[in-house]
Image (tube, helix red, strand yellow):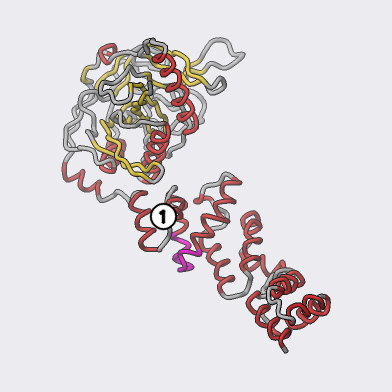
Amino acid sequence: MTYEPVIGVEVHAQLQTQTKLFCSCPTSFGLPPNTQVCPVCLGLPGSLPVLNQRAVEMAVRTGLALHCDMTRANQFSRKNYFYPDLPKGYQISQYDLPICGPGWLEISVKGKSKRVRIMRAHLEEDAGKNVHDEGAEGSHVDLNRAGTPLLEIVTEPDLHSSDEVDAYLKTLRDLLVYLDVCDGNMEQGSFRCEPNVSLRPQGQETLGTKVELKNINSFRFAKDALEYEMNRQAEILREGGVVVQETRLWDVNKGQTAVMRSKEAAHDYRYFPDPDLLPVTLDPEWIEELRQTIPELPCSRLRRFVQDYQLSEYDAAILTDSKGLADYFESCVKFFPHPKTVSNWVTGELLRELNTSGTSAEDSPVCPDRLAELLQLVDSGTVSLKVARELFPELYSTGMTPEQLVKEKGLIQVSDEGQLTVIIKEVLAQHQAQVEQYRGGKEAVLGFLVGQVMKASKGTANPGKVNELLKHSLTS
Ligand SMILES: [Zn+2]
């Protein structure tokens, strides 16, 4: 029996606001515990939450980019549960009236595009953090994070493989980063995902029992955890067993999932509208205003790169994979209007250095105008392409200008006929046998001789000129 996996994904994206969702405490991290708190986010009696307009704005912009239904009124509800990092004893979230209704996101898996339906997206506050330091006495609670705005984005169970989930997560993260609503940093927890997966016999309509996966903070883990879980469930079903509905944790070290808790149903949380917060009604004019602020999104940018710059789909996809790299490319093309050449350098030399040093395109020590300067030197024949390629890593590590570096290293391309002729004469004198072969009709030897001249000039000779002059000396 073969089984079809049915997967849905919940993503918690931390919105990049300056302050928390219901108070004016800063959202900055890495500060001493419990220093970014006030009566509201500490949940002290008598304090009242005030909704952060910027967070609503970011939720609306995300909803619009996800083609969500935004016309409804929405409302905050209390999700009641007890946990030490939740000082109020409830989390302010949205339940039956989320800010973003149904929408969709287009993803591409192995060249095939597919629409993933978004069920909803809602605003909620983050909880604090329990700290269990080894060696310390007892556990501690840090509430700096409590009240940080999150947007929870939930899909319909439209995904059917770990590859599709991977594509969905990457596309969604790119989108949020492009929109400037989330920094997409998975390690710091600003983009967290919780996939749920069930199996059903191939061809069956009814869904199987689903298991939710937690503690996933990298694309790799999402893939590994899903693969593990699909195999685990298939094994149970094949042996005639029953999959239990539960939440499981991904253990990175063991490479397996383990039970965290049996799944709660919504009624366990006793949701009810938060009496301290008014329902939010979005003004259609404001929605339209926000629509205008949505930048060009990755998929349309990719299409434009193919059309306007005549790039291959493959190159355009690499360039638009991150907003920073796409911006870098376009800015470089402004200085050096040969898109194909720029694309080759950005996806080749530049990306190699960025990946090796773990730097983003925005922080590249070689800025777009510097790269353009180097390409200009190649274009004008001042340096050869080969030399330019070899120089790039040094340009990247030293921060010098291309012209400084070329001058300092004496790598200016030699096109002067007098200088080249001297080298050519020497080379021909040293390789009499090859000269005879060429003159006897074996023209392929020319390549060898060009190579010798290039070597003798330490790569600075202009290859076109060398070719021309060599032919001339050999036939005269
Ligand atoms: Zn506060």
Quarter of the picture holding the C terminus: bottom right
Residue 340 painted magenta:
yes
Left or right: 93, with 19 as reference point: left
Segment colored magenta: 330-341
Mark 1 is on which residue type? Glu
Residue 103 painted magenta:
no
Q: Residue at x 57, y 46 (%)?
A: 355
Q: Could you tell me residue 444's position as x and y percent? A: 68, 73
Q: Quadrant of residue 242?
A: top left
Q: How many marks?
A: 1
Q: In the orientation shown, which residue stands out farthest toward the bottom?
A: 476
In what quadrant does ligand 1 lie? Answer: top left
Secondary structure of the magenta portion, mostly? helix
Quarter of the picture holding the N terminus: top left
Q: Nearer the viewer, residue 117 or 260?
A: 117
Answer above or below: position of 262 versus 199.
above
Q: Quadrant of residue 199?
A: top left
Q: Which residue is mark 1?
A: 313
Q: Nearer the viewer, residue 34 or 391?
A: 391
